[in-house]
Amino acid sequence: MQRLLIRGGRRLEGEVSIAGAKNAALPELCAALLTDEPVRLHNVPQLQDVATMLRLIANMGVQAERVGGTTVQIDAAALTTPEAPYELVKTMRASVLALGPLLARFGEATVSLPGGCAIGSRPVDQHIKGLQAMGAQIDVEHGYMLARLPRGRSRLHGARIVTDMVTVTGTENLMMAATLAEGETLLENAAQEPEVVDLAEMLIAMGARIEGHGTSRIRIQGVDRLHGCVHTVVPDRIEAGTFLCAAAATGGDIRLRDARGEHLDAVIEKLRDAGAEVACGPGWIHLRSQGRMRAQSFRTTEYPGFPTDMQAQFMALNCIAEGAAKVTETIFENRFMHVNELVRLGARIQIDGKVALIEGVPRLSGATVMATDLRASASLVIAGLVADGETLVERIYHLDRGYDRMEVKLRALGADIERIS
Ligand SMILES: CC(=O)N[C@H]1[C@@H](OP(=O)(O)OP(=O)(O)OC[C@H]2O[C@@H](n3ccc(=O)[nH]c3=O)[C@H](O)[C@@H]2O)O[C@H](CO)[C@@H](O)[C@@H]1O
Ligand SMILES: C=C(OP(=O)(O)O)C(=O)O
Protein backbone atom coordinates (compact mmCIF):
# COMPACT_ATOMS: atom_id res chain seq x y z
CA MET A 1 0.00 0.00 0.00
CA GLN A 2 1.26 3.50 -0.84
CA ARG A 3 1.97 6.19 1.75
CA LEU A 4 3.22 9.73 1.82
CA LEU A 5 6.42 10.50 3.68
CA ILE A 6 6.70 14.15 4.64
CA ARG A 7 9.64 15.88 6.31
CA GLY A 8 8.10 19.01 7.77
CA GLY A 9 9.44 22.51 8.13
CA ARG A 10 9.71 23.74 4.53
CA ARG A 11 8.01 26.96 3.47
CA LEU A 12 5.83 26.61 0.34
CA GLU A 13 6.88 29.01 -2.37
CA GLY A 14 6.21 29.30 -6.10
CA GLU A 15 3.45 28.77 -8.61
CA VAL A 16 1.12 25.83 -9.15
CA SER A 17 -1.69 25.07 -11.56
CA ILE A 18 -5.11 24.01 -10.25
CA ALA A 19 -6.90 21.13 -11.98
CA GLY A 20 -10.53 20.89 -13.08
CA ALA A 21 -13.03 20.26 -10.30
CA LYS A 22 -13.71 16.64 -9.36
CA ASN A 23 -17.22 17.59 -8.26
CA ALA A 24 -17.99 19.19 -11.62
CA ALA A 25 -16.27 16.59 -13.82
CA LEU A 26 -18.18 13.67 -12.25
CA PRO A 27 -21.72 14.98 -12.95
CA GLU A 28 -20.59 16.25 -16.35
CA LEU A 29 -19.38 12.78 -17.36
CA CYS A 30 -22.88 11.55 -16.45
CA ALA A 31 -24.50 14.42 -18.38
CA ALA A 32 -22.87 13.01 -21.52
CA LEU A 33 -25.22 10.01 -21.13
CA LEU A 34 -28.15 12.31 -21.99
CA THR A 35 -27.26 12.42 -25.69
CA ASP A 36 -26.37 10.04 -28.50
CA GLU A 37 -23.90 12.58 -29.89
CA PRO A 38 -20.24 12.85 -28.84
CA VAL A 39 -19.34 15.10 -25.92
CA ARG A 40 -15.84 16.45 -25.38
CA LEU A 41 -14.79 17.62 -21.92
CA HIS A 42 -11.61 19.63 -21.38
CA ASN A 43 -9.79 20.17 -18.07
CA VAL A 44 -10.92 16.81 -16.64
CA PRO A 45 -8.70 16.16 -13.59
CA GLN A 46 -6.53 13.05 -13.51
CA LEU A 47 -7.73 11.37 -10.37
CA GLN A 48 -9.13 8.10 -9.18
CA ASP A 49 -12.81 9.12 -9.04
CA VAL A 50 -12.70 10.18 -12.68
CA ALA A 51 -11.11 6.85 -13.63
CA THR A 52 -13.89 5.07 -11.70
CA MET A 53 -16.58 7.13 -13.45
CA LEU A 54 -15.05 6.38 -16.86
CA ARG A 55 -15.10 2.68 -16.00
CA LEU A 56 -18.69 2.95 -14.81
CA ILE A 57 -19.94 4.49 -18.03
CA ALA A 58 -17.75 2.26 -20.23
CA ASN A 59 -19.42 -0.65 -18.45
CA MET A 60 -22.74 0.59 -19.89
CA GLY A 61 -21.41 0.19 -23.43
CA VAL A 62 -20.43 3.84 -23.79
CA GLN A 63 -17.19 4.89 -25.49
CA ALA A 64 -15.41 6.98 -22.91
CA GLU A 65 -11.72 7.68 -23.13
CA ARG A 66 -9.03 10.23 -22.53
CA VAL A 67 -7.85 11.71 -25.80
CA GLY A 68 -4.78 13.50 -24.49
CA GLY A 69 -3.96 14.65 -20.96
CA THR A 70 -7.06 16.30 -19.59
CA THR A 71 -9.51 15.91 -22.48
CA VAL A 72 -12.12 13.18 -22.40
CA GLN A 73 -14.39 12.12 -25.25
CA ILE A 74 -17.66 10.37 -24.47
CA ASP A 75 -19.96 8.83 -27.03
CA ALA A 76 -23.09 7.35 -25.47
CA ALA A 77 -24.80 6.49 -28.80
CA ALA A 78 -24.33 2.77 -28.24
CA LEU A 79 -25.30 2.66 -24.56
CA THR A 80 -26.67 -0.86 -24.02
CA THR A 81 -26.85 -1.37 -20.26
CA PRO A 82 -28.31 1.45 -18.16
CA GLU A 83 -26.83 0.04 -14.98
CA ALA A 84 -24.42 1.10 -12.25
CA PRO A 85 -23.26 -1.99 -10.35
CA TYR A 86 -22.35 -2.04 -6.65
CA GLU A 87 -18.69 -2.92 -7.31
CA LEU A 88 -18.16 0.47 -8.95
CA VAL A 89 -20.64 2.52 -6.92
CA LYS A 90 -19.23 1.45 -3.56
CA THR A 91 -15.92 3.21 -4.17
CA MET A 92 -17.53 6.44 -5.35
CA ARG A 93 -20.84 7.85 -4.19
CA ALA A 94 -21.06 10.21 -7.18
CA SER A 95 -22.06 7.15 -9.27
CA VAL A 96 -25.62 7.92 -8.17
CA LEU A 97 -25.44 10.78 -10.68
CA ALA A 98 -26.00 8.24 -13.45
CA LEU A 99 -29.59 7.69 -12.25
CA GLY A 100 -31.20 10.92 -13.51
CA PRO A 101 -29.63 10.92 -17.00
CA LEU A 102 -30.27 7.19 -17.62
CA LEU A 103 -33.88 7.41 -16.55
CA ALA A 104 -34.48 10.55 -18.60
CA ARG A 105 -33.02 9.16 -21.82
CA PHE A 106 -33.89 5.45 -21.63
CA GLY A 107 -36.90 5.37 -19.30
CA GLU A 108 -35.12 2.87 -17.08
CA ALA A 109 -32.09 2.57 -14.85
CA THR A 110 -30.66 0.20 -12.28
CA VAL A 111 -28.27 1.93 -9.94
CA SER A 112 -26.78 0.53 -6.77
CA LEU A 113 -27.49 2.42 -3.57
CA PRO A 114 -24.21 4.05 -2.60
CA GLY A 115 -24.39 3.16 1.09
CA GLY A 116 -22.85 5.18 3.89
CA CYS A 117 -19.30 6.39 4.08
CA ALA A 118 -16.77 7.63 6.61
CA ILE A 119 -18.18 11.15 6.82
CA GLY A 120 -21.83 10.21 7.36
CA SER A 121 -24.78 8.07 6.30
CA ARG A 122 -25.46 10.18 3.18
CA PRO A 123 -28.87 8.90 2.08
CA VAL A 124 -30.22 9.56 -1.45
CA ASP A 125 -33.90 9.81 -0.50
CA GLN A 126 -34.19 13.31 -2.02
CA HIS A 127 -32.93 12.07 -5.40
CA ILE A 128 -35.56 9.31 -5.31
CA LYS A 129 -38.37 11.58 -4.09
CA GLY A 130 -37.62 14.14 -6.81
CA LEU A 131 -37.55 11.58 -9.61
CA GLN A 132 -40.80 10.07 -8.32
CA ALA A 133 -42.41 13.52 -8.45
CA MET A 134 -41.37 13.55 -12.13
CA GLY A 135 -43.28 10.32 -12.71
CA ALA A 136 -40.61 7.66 -12.16
CA GLN A 137 -41.42 4.42 -10.41
CA ILE A 138 -38.52 3.48 -8.17
CA ASP A 139 -38.24 0.32 -6.10
CA VAL A 140 -35.33 -0.38 -3.84
CA GLU A 141 -34.49 -4.08 -3.93
CA HIS A 142 -31.37 -6.04 -3.03
CA GLY A 143 -29.41 -2.80 -2.56
CA TYR A 144 -30.37 -1.42 -5.97
CA MET A 145 -32.64 1.40 -7.10
CA LEU A 146 -34.76 -0.05 -9.90
CA ALA A 147 -36.18 2.93 -11.75
CA ARG A 148 -38.52 2.96 -14.72
CA LEU A 149 -41.36 4.91 -16.29
CA PRO A 150 -44.97 3.73 -15.96
CA ARG A 151 -46.29 1.62 -18.84
CA GLY A 152 -47.31 3.79 -21.78
CA ARG A 153 -45.06 6.70 -20.87
CA SER A 154 -41.83 7.44 -22.70
CA ARG A 155 -40.67 10.53 -20.79
CA LEU A 156 -40.50 11.93 -17.30
CA HIS A 157 -42.75 14.91 -16.72
CA GLY A 158 -41.91 18.27 -15.19
CA ALA A 159 -42.70 18.93 -11.53
CA ARG A 160 -42.16 21.46 -8.74
CA ILE A 161 -39.71 19.84 -6.33
CA VAL A 162 -38.81 21.23 -2.92
CA THR A 163 -36.00 19.20 -1.38
CA ASP A 164 -35.95 18.79 2.42
CA MET A 165 -32.39 20.12 2.53
CA VAL A 166 -29.95 21.61 0.07
CA THR A 167 -28.32 18.70 -1.74
CA VAL A 168 -25.61 19.17 -4.34
CA THR A 169 -25.76 15.87 -6.21
CA GLY A 170 -29.54 15.76 -5.61
CA THR A 171 -29.91 19.10 -7.45
CA GLU A 172 -27.60 17.86 -10.21
CA ASN A 173 -29.43 14.56 -10.69
CA LEU A 174 -32.84 16.23 -10.85
CA MET A 175 -31.63 19.05 -13.11
CA MET A 176 -30.17 16.50 -15.57
CA ALA A 177 -33.35 14.41 -15.51
CA ALA A 178 -35.52 17.49 -16.04
CA THR A 179 -33.70 18.53 -19.23
CA LEU A 180 -35.43 15.74 -21.18
CA ALA A 181 -38.72 15.70 -19.24
CA GLU A 182 -42.02 16.85 -20.73
CA GLY A 183 -42.85 20.36 -19.53
CA GLU A 184 -41.38 22.54 -16.83
CA THR A 185 -39.52 21.53 -13.67
CA LEU A 186 -38.93 23.92 -10.82
CA LEU A 187 -36.23 22.96 -8.33
CA GLU A 188 -36.72 24.87 -5.08
CA ASN A 189 -34.08 24.92 -2.33
CA ALA A 190 -31.56 24.05 -5.05
CA ALA A 191 -27.82 23.93 -4.39
CA GLN A 192 -25.93 27.02 -5.62
CA GLU A 193 -22.44 25.52 -5.72
CA PRO A 194 -20.20 26.58 -8.66
CA GLU A 195 -20.16 22.94 -9.78
CA VAL A 196 -23.98 22.99 -10.18
CA VAL A 197 -23.64 26.17 -12.25
CA ASP A 198 -20.90 24.63 -14.39
CA LEU A 199 -23.06 21.57 -15.03
CA ALA A 200 -26.00 23.80 -15.98
CA GLU A 201 -23.78 25.65 -18.45
CA MET A 202 -22.71 22.38 -20.02
CA LEU A 203 -26.33 21.23 -20.29
CA ILE A 204 -27.30 24.54 -21.91
CA ALA A 205 -24.47 24.01 -24.42
CA MET A 206 -26.14 20.64 -25.17
CA GLY A 207 -29.43 22.40 -25.93
CA ALA A 208 -31.08 22.30 -22.48
CA ARG A 209 -33.31 25.19 -21.40
CA ILE A 210 -32.28 26.13 -17.86
CA GLU A 211 -32.63 29.37 -15.90
CA GLY A 212 -31.81 30.36 -12.35
CA HIS A 213 -28.73 28.13 -11.86
CA GLY A 214 -26.59 29.69 -9.16
CA THR A 215 -29.75 30.59 -7.19
CA SER A 216 -31.94 28.45 -4.95
CA ARG A 217 -34.63 28.18 -7.67
CA ILE A 218 -33.73 26.49 -10.93
CA ARG A 219 -36.28 26.39 -13.74
CA ILE A 220 -35.90 23.80 -16.49
CA GLN A 221 -38.05 23.52 -19.64
CA GLY A 222 -37.72 19.98 -20.94
CA VAL A 223 -36.65 19.49 -24.57
CA ASP A 224 -37.10 16.46 -26.89
CA ARG A 225 -33.41 15.77 -27.27
CA LEU A 226 -29.97 17.08 -26.37
CA HIS A 227 -26.98 17.23 -28.68
CA GLY A 228 -23.23 16.89 -28.18
CA CYS A 229 -21.05 19.72 -26.90
CA VAL A 230 -17.55 20.79 -25.98
CA HIS A 231 -17.18 21.99 -22.41
CA THR A 232 -14.31 22.97 -20.10
CA VAL A 233 -14.59 21.85 -16.46
CA VAL A 234 -14.49 24.70 -13.93
CA PRO A 235 -11.31 24.86 -11.75
CA ASP A 236 -11.37 22.93 -8.48
CA ARG A 237 -12.04 25.42 -5.68
CA ILE A 238 -11.36 22.77 -3.03
CA GLU A 239 -7.96 21.88 -4.46
CA ALA A 240 -7.20 25.61 -4.61
CA GLY A 241 -8.36 26.11 -1.01
CA THR A 242 -6.25 23.17 0.13
CA PHE A 243 -3.08 24.68 -1.37
CA LEU A 244 -3.92 28.07 0.15
CA CYS A 245 -4.26 26.53 3.63
CA ALA A 246 -1.03 24.58 3.16
CA ALA A 247 0.83 27.74 2.13
CA ALA A 248 -0.63 29.80 4.99
CA ALA A 249 0.31 27.09 7.50
CA THR A 250 3.93 27.04 6.32
CA GLY A 251 4.33 30.84 6.20
CA GLY A 252 4.55 30.53 2.44
CA ASP A 253 4.11 32.62 -0.67
CA ILE A 254 2.30 30.90 -3.54
CA ARG A 255 0.44 31.80 -6.69
CA LEU A 256 -2.30 29.52 -8.00
CA ARG A 257 -2.87 29.48 -11.75
CA ASP A 258 -6.19 28.40 -13.29
CA ALA A 259 -8.03 29.13 -10.04
CA ARG A 260 -11.19 31.15 -9.38
CA GLY A 261 -10.96 33.33 -6.25
CA GLU A 262 -14.64 34.30 -6.51
CA HIS A 263 -15.59 30.66 -5.80
CA LEU A 264 -13.65 30.68 -2.54
CA ASP A 265 -14.82 33.89 -0.87
CA ALA A 266 -15.64 32.34 2.52
CA VAL A 267 -12.29 30.53 2.77
CA ILE A 268 -10.25 33.49 1.53
CA GLU A 269 -11.99 35.79 4.03
CA LYS A 270 -10.98 33.44 6.88
CA LEU A 271 -7.41 33.24 5.58
CA ARG A 272 -7.23 37.04 5.58
CA ASP A 273 -8.66 37.18 9.11
CA ALA A 274 -5.99 34.65 10.08
CA GLY A 275 -3.32 37.08 8.90
CA ALA A 276 -2.53 35.99 5.32
CA GLU A 277 -2.43 38.46 2.46
CA VAL A 278 -4.57 37.14 -0.39
CA ALA A 279 -5.00 38.78 -3.79
CA CYS A 280 -7.11 37.46 -6.67
CA GLY A 281 -7.32 38.27 -10.35
CA PRO A 282 -8.73 36.63 -13.47
CA GLY A 283 -7.68 33.00 -13.20
CA TRP A 284 -5.19 33.42 -10.35
CA ILE A 285 -4.94 33.63 -6.56
CA HIS A 286 -1.84 34.82 -4.69
CA LEU A 287 -1.31 34.14 -0.97
CA ARG A 288 1.52 35.44 1.16
CA SER A 289 1.86 34.73 4.87
CA GLN A 290 4.47 35.21 7.54
CA GLY A 291 4.83 33.84 11.04
CA ARG A 292 1.98 32.20 12.92
CA MET A 293 -1.57 32.64 11.73
CA ARG A 294 -4.39 33.51 14.15
CA ALA A 295 -6.90 30.68 14.77
CA GLN A 296 -10.31 31.23 13.12
CA SER A 297 -13.73 29.96 14.09
CA PHE A 298 -16.17 28.97 11.35
CA ARG A 299 -19.30 26.95 10.56
CA THR A 300 -19.60 24.85 7.45
CA THR A 301 -22.68 25.65 5.36
CA GLU A 302 -23.91 25.35 1.81
CA TYR A 303 -22.38 27.61 -0.84
CA PRO A 304 -21.60 30.48 -0.62
CA GLY A 305 -20.81 29.66 3.03
CA PHE A 306 -17.68 27.91 4.27
CA PRO A 307 -17.48 24.54 2.44
CA THR A 308 -17.53 21.32 4.44
CA ASP A 309 -14.93 20.05 1.95
CA MET A 310 -12.47 22.64 3.38
CA GLN A 311 -13.20 22.06 7.07
CA ALA A 312 -10.45 19.51 7.73
CA GLN A 313 -7.74 21.47 5.89
CA PHE A 314 -8.52 24.73 7.71
CA MET A 315 -8.60 22.83 10.98
CA ALA A 316 -5.01 21.71 10.34
CA LEU A 317 -4.07 25.38 9.95
CA ASN A 318 -5.90 26.25 13.19
CA CYS A 319 -3.97 23.55 15.04
CA ILE A 320 -0.70 25.50 14.80
CA ALA A 321 -2.20 28.99 14.88
CA GLU A 322 -2.17 31.44 17.75
CA GLY A 323 -5.27 31.36 19.97
CA ALA A 324 -8.31 29.12 20.00
CA ALA A 325 -11.10 28.44 17.51
CA LYS A 326 -14.47 26.74 17.35
CA VAL A 327 -15.25 24.77 14.19
CA THR A 328 -18.86 23.68 13.66
CA GLU A 329 -19.66 21.03 11.04
CA THR A 330 -23.29 21.37 10.00
CA ILE A 331 -23.42 19.34 6.78
CA PHE A 332 -22.18 15.84 7.67
CA GLU A 333 -22.68 14.11 11.02
CA ASN A 334 -19.31 12.37 11.14
CA ARG A 335 -16.76 14.65 9.53
CA PHE A 336 -14.24 14.93 12.35
CA MET A 337 -12.39 11.68 11.64
CA HIS A 338 -9.14 13.60 11.12
CA VAL A 339 -9.23 14.98 14.67
CA ASN A 340 -7.78 11.94 16.43
CA GLU A 341 -5.00 11.74 13.85
CA LEU A 342 -4.20 15.45 14.22
CA VAL A 343 -4.08 14.90 17.99
CA ARG A 344 -1.48 12.18 17.36
CA LEU A 345 0.66 14.88 15.77
CA GLY A 346 0.37 17.00 18.92
CA ALA A 347 -2.74 19.08 18.16
CA ARG A 348 -5.07 20.07 20.99
CA ILE A 349 -8.66 19.47 19.90
CA GLN A 350 -11.80 18.50 21.77
CA ILE A 351 -14.99 17.40 20.08
CA ASP A 352 -18.42 18.09 21.43
CA GLY A 353 -21.04 16.84 18.96
CA LYS A 354 -20.91 19.03 15.86
CA VAL A 355 -18.28 21.32 17.39
CA ALA A 356 -14.51 20.95 17.55
CA LEU A 357 -12.61 23.26 19.89
CA ILE A 358 -9.05 23.79 18.81
CA GLU A 359 -6.38 25.36 20.94
CA GLY A 360 -3.45 26.31 18.75
CA VAL A 361 -0.03 24.95 19.70
CA PRO A 362 3.33 26.37 18.55
CA ARG A 363 4.49 23.12 16.97
CA LEU A 364 3.34 19.68 15.88
CA SER A 365 5.57 16.63 15.90
CA GLY A 366 5.68 14.11 13.08
CA ALA A 367 4.19 10.63 13.49
CA THR A 368 2.51 7.89 11.47
CA VAL A 369 -1.12 8.80 10.82
CA MET A 370 -3.96 7.19 8.94
CA ALA A 371 -6.13 8.94 6.37
CA THR A 372 -9.83 8.16 6.80
CA ASP A 373 -11.43 10.10 3.96
CA LEU A 374 -10.48 12.43 1.14
CA ARG A 375 -10.27 15.81 2.89
CA ALA A 376 -9.07 14.26 6.15
CA SER A 377 -6.08 13.02 4.13
CA ALA A 378 -5.40 16.54 2.88
CA SER A 379 -5.51 17.92 6.42
CA LEU A 380 -2.95 15.35 7.56
CA VAL A 381 -0.68 16.31 4.69
CA ILE A 382 -0.89 19.99 5.72
CA ALA A 383 -0.16 19.07 9.33
CA GLY A 384 2.79 16.94 8.17
CA LEU A 385 4.21 19.90 6.21
CA VAL A 386 4.52 21.93 9.42
CA ALA A 387 5.30 19.15 11.92
CA ASP A 388 8.83 18.60 13.22
CA GLY A 389 10.50 15.50 11.79
CA GLU A 390 8.84 12.83 9.65
CA THR A 391 5.14 12.24 9.14
CA LEU A 392 3.93 9.14 7.36
CA VAL A 393 0.38 9.36 5.99
CA GLU A 394 -1.15 5.94 5.39
CA ARG A 395 -4.18 4.91 3.28
CA ILE A 396 -3.64 7.66 0.75
CA TYR A 397 -5.99 5.97 -1.69
CA HIS A 398 -8.53 8.34 -0.15
CA LEU A 399 -6.37 11.30 -1.22
CA ASP A 400 -5.95 9.92 -4.74
CA ARG A 401 -9.73 9.84 -5.16
CA GLY A 402 -9.82 13.60 -5.35
CA TYR A 403 -6.40 15.22 -5.79
CA ASP A 404 -4.42 15.34 -9.01
CA ARG A 405 -0.82 14.37 -8.03
CA MET A 406 -0.85 16.39 -4.85
CA GLU A 407 2.65 15.41 -3.75
CA VAL A 408 4.14 16.32 -7.14
CA LYS A 409 2.60 19.80 -6.92
CA LEU A 410 3.70 20.25 -3.30
CA ARG A 411 7.23 19.17 -4.18
CA ALA A 412 7.32 21.79 -6.93
CA LEU A 413 6.48 24.35 -4.23
CA GLY A 414 9.43 23.23 -2.13
CA ALA A 415 7.85 20.64 0.18
CA ASP A 416 9.86 17.58 1.19
CA ILE A 417 7.25 14.94 0.39
CA GLU A 418 7.42 11.62 -1.43
CA ARG A 419 5.17 8.71 -2.23
CA ILE A 420 6.54 5.41 -0.98
CA SER A 421 5.26 1.87 -1.32
C1 LIG B 1 -19.57 14.48 -5.78
C2 LIG B 1 -19.93 15.68 -5.00
O1 LIG B 1 -20.31 16.70 -5.55
N1 LIG B 1 -19.76 15.60 -3.68
C3 LIG B 1 -20.04 16.77 -2.85
C4 LIG B 1 -21.53 16.82 -2.59
O2 LIG B 1 -21.89 15.59 -1.97
P1 LIG B 1 -23.43 15.21 -1.87
O3 LIG B 1 -24.16 15.77 -3.01
O4 LIG B 1 -23.48 13.74 -1.62
O5 LIG B 1 -23.86 15.99 -0.56
P2 LIG B 1 -25.30 16.63 -0.32
O6 LIG B 1 -25.24 18.08 -0.67
O7 LIG B 1 -26.31 15.80 -1.01
O8 LIG B 1 -25.46 16.43 1.25
C5 LIG B 1 -25.87 17.47 2.12
C6 LIG B 1 -26.59 16.85 3.30
O9 LIG B 1 -27.85 16.36 2.87
C7 LIG B 1 -28.05 15.01 3.25
N2 LIG B 1 -28.85 14.36 2.20
C8 LIG B 1 -28.53 14.53 0.89
C9 LIG B 1 -29.26 13.94 -0.10
C10 LIG B 1 -30.38 13.17 0.25
O10 LIG B 1 -31.08 12.60 -0.59
N3 LIG B 1 -30.68 13.03 1.55
C11 LIG B 1 -29.95 13.60 2.55
O11 LIG B 1 -30.25 13.44 3.73
C12 LIG B 1 -26.63 14.46 3.35
O12 LIG B 1 -26.57 13.31 4.14
C13 LIG B 1 -25.87 15.64 3.93
O13 LIG B 1 -26.05 15.67 5.32
O14 LIG B 1 -21.82 17.91 -1.73
C14 LIG B 1 -21.19 17.83 -0.44
C15 LIG B 1 -21.67 19.03 0.35
O15 LIG B 1 -21.18 20.19 -0.17
C16 LIG B 1 -19.69 17.78 -0.60
O16 LIG B 1 -19.12 17.54 0.67
C17 LIG B 1 -19.27 16.66 -1.55
O17 LIG B 1 -17.90 16.81 -1.86
C1 LIG C 1 -16.91 14.31 0.21
C2 LIG C 1 -16.33 14.50 -0.97
O1 LIG C 1 -16.57 13.80 -2.10
P1 LIG C 1 -17.65 12.66 -2.38
O2 LIG C 1 -19.00 13.31 -2.33
O3 LIG C 1 -17.31 12.23 -3.76
O4 LIG C 1 -17.48 11.62 -1.33
C3 LIG C 1 -15.30 15.55 -1.17
O5 LIG C 1 -15.00 15.85 -2.34
O6 LIG C 1 -14.76 16.08 -0.17
Image (cartoon, rainbow, N blue to C red):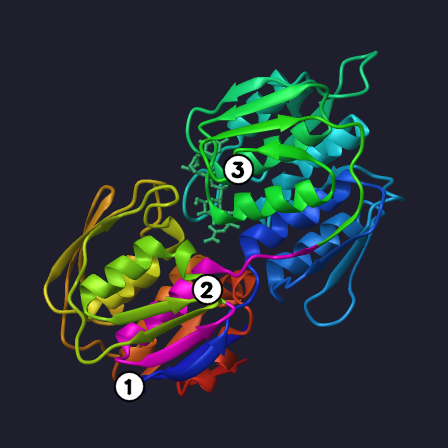
Work out how far the residue at label 1 is from the one at label 2, CA to CA, in angstroms: 21 Å
Q: Earlier in the sequence, mark 1 or mark 2?
A: 1
Residue 247 included in the magenta stretch of the image: yes
Q: Which residue is mark 2?
A: 239
Crowding at mark 3 (Cα within 10 Å: few <14, some 14-19, many 20+): many
Q: Earlier in the sequence, mark 1 or mark 3?
A: 1
Q: Give the residue type at disc 1.
A: Gly
Q: Which residue is mark 1?
A: 9
User: Which callout, 1 or 3, points to the residue nearer the camera?
Assistant: 3
User: In the displayed structure, does residue 181 sit left or right of residue 46?
Assistant: right
Q: Give the residue type at disc 3.
A: His
Marker disc for residue 312: none
**Magenta segment range?**
231-258
In this rendered view, identify the residue nearer to me: 386 or 171.
171
Q: Quadrant of the N terminus?
A: bottom right
Q: Which residue is mark 3?
A: 213
Is residue 60 depicted above or below 350 in this figure?
above
At x 57%, y 33%, the residue is: 211
Q: Is residue 337 visible?
A: no
- Element type at mark 2: helix
User: In the displayed structure, does residue 89 sit left or right of residue 5?
Assistant: right
In this rendered view, identify the residue nearer to me: 258 or 282.
282
Residue 227 included in the magenta stretch of the image: no
User: Which callout, 3 or 2, points to the residue nearer the camera?
Assistant: 3
Is residue 213 depicted above or below 359 in this figure?
above
